[in-house]
Image (cartoon, rainbow, N blue to C red):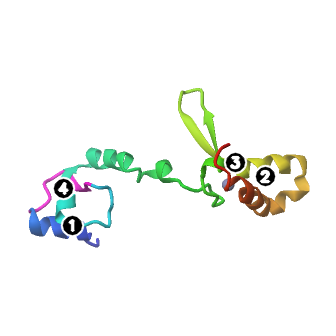
Amino acid sequence: MQKKVHRLVMAAFVGPCPDGMEVCHNDGNPANNYVGNLRYDTHQANYADMFIHNTHGMATKTHCRNNHEFSPGNTLIHNRKNGRTQRSCRSCWAAKSYINRHPEMKPSFQALADSYFEKYGKENHV
Ligand SMILES: [Zn+2]
């Protein structure tokens, strides 16, 4: 297994990694391997960090699966029954509903969604 730079930095400046601990980046930036940015902590703390720094999964999503940016004009916020909110891409949603009415356009989904994005992506409000 390849050693990560942050592990080498910590081993050199701080000491060996204690059992059950891992190297965490205080600023959440894995490329910042300055020793002052690193600490040994538990996996749970490291995982919690990811949410704080928005480097985990959904939270980092800035684009939909078809690569449209979640800009203010292109983001639909749904309130779900469980009290959480979910974002979806307004351009893709518009393209999907268009295709529901015009199934023959299905092969052009991406182009259609892209042209909606041309419009919505520049708007500031939904
Ligand atoms: Zn989209």
Name the residue that disc number 1 marks: 34
Q: Quadrant of ligand 1?
A: bottom right
Question: In this view, which residue lies farthest toward the front?
Answer: 124
Name the residue located 9 percent from the left edge and 62 percent from the top edge. Answer: 14
Which of the 4 image quarters holds residue 4?
bottom left
Q: What amino acid is found at the position of numbered circle 3 in the picture?
A: Arg
Which of the 4 image quarters holds residue 119?
bottom right
Q: Disc 4 versus disc 2: distance between alpha carbons?
A: 47 Å
Q: Is residue 98 above or below residue 80?
A: below
Name the residue that disc number 3 marks: 90
Q: Which of pointers 4 and 2 lies earlier in the amino acid sequence?
A: 4
Q: Which of pointers 3 and 2 lies earlier in the amino acid sequence?
A: 3
Say whether residue 114 is magenta. no
Label 3 SS = helix
Q: Residue 93: percent from the left, percent from the top?
A: 73, 47
Q: Disc 1 versus disc 2: distance between alpha carbons?
A: 46 Å
Q: Which of pointers 3 and 1 lies earlier in the amino acid sequence?
A: 1
Question: In this view, which residue lies farthest toward the bottom?
Answer: 2
Give the left or right position of residue 87, taking residue 1 as reference.
right
Q: Disc 3 versus disc 1: distance between alpha carbons?
A: 41 Å
Judge by depth and name the residue closer to the eye, 72 or 53. Answer: 72
Which mark is nearer the camera, 4 or 1?
1
Label 4 SS = strand
Name the residue that disc number 4 marks: 39
Q: Which of pointers 4 and 3 lies earlier in the amino acid sequence?
A: 4
Name the residue located 73 percent from the left edge and 60 percent from the top edge. Answer: 118
Label 1 SS = loop
Name the residue that disc number 2 marks: 95
Q: What amino acid is found at the position of numbered circle 1 in the picture?
A: Tyr
